[in-house]
Amino acid sequence: QLVESGGGLVHPGGSLKLSCTGSGFTFTDYAIGWFRQAPGKERERVLCSSKDGETYWDDSKKGRFTISRDNAENTVFLQMADLKPDDTAIYSCHRRYFCSSPTSLDWGQGTQVTVPS
């Protein structure tokens, strides 16, 4: 099971830190990736943390977004800074064998991030 938290409403330029906590599996055996889906748009990849803690996926987001993991707490974090209205979306975390895997094994229900224009 994956459970996200930390979403909310933040004004442009603000920051949020999302958390994804896993249970029921050996956390260190899996990559955890963050996706987001905005209203009327397709789901897109954000950043992924490999089992070894390396960061993959959208290089364009690495300047404002940072992914990290605390294996002792079975949690992956997504730190987001300088948020923009275009960042408004439901953010969900996905469990995968590898960041490069074509599909996810499971995912959480998501947490809403809203950045008003």
Image: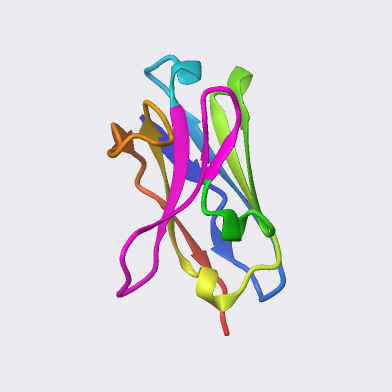
- Which percent across, then down, holds residue 57? 50, 47
- Which percent across, then down, holds residue 43? 34, 60
Judge whether residue 104 is colored magenta: no
Of 48 and 15, the residue lying toward us: 48
Instruction: From the viewer's perspective, tell me whether residue 105 is left or right of residue 30.
Output: left
Quadrant of the rendered image containing residue 107:
top left
Q: Residue at x 34, y 34 (%)?
A: 101
Point out the image quarter for the C terminus.
bottom right
Q: Residue at x 37, y 18 (%)?
A: 24
Q: Which residues are magenta?
A: 31-56
Judge whether residue 36 is colored magenta: yes
- Position of residue 90 relative to residue 102, above or below, is below
- Which percent across, then down, holds residue 46? 49, 53
- Which percent across, then down, holds residue 88? 49, 70
What colouring does the structure picture have?
rainbow
- Position of residue 36 relative to residue 52, above or below, is below
Of 100 and 70, the residue lying toward us: 100
Q: How many marks?
A: 0
Q: Residue at x 59, y 58 (%)?
A: 61
Quadrant of the rendered image containing residue 55:
top right
Q: Residue at x 38, y 32 (%)?
A: 95
Point out the image quarter for the N terminus.
top left
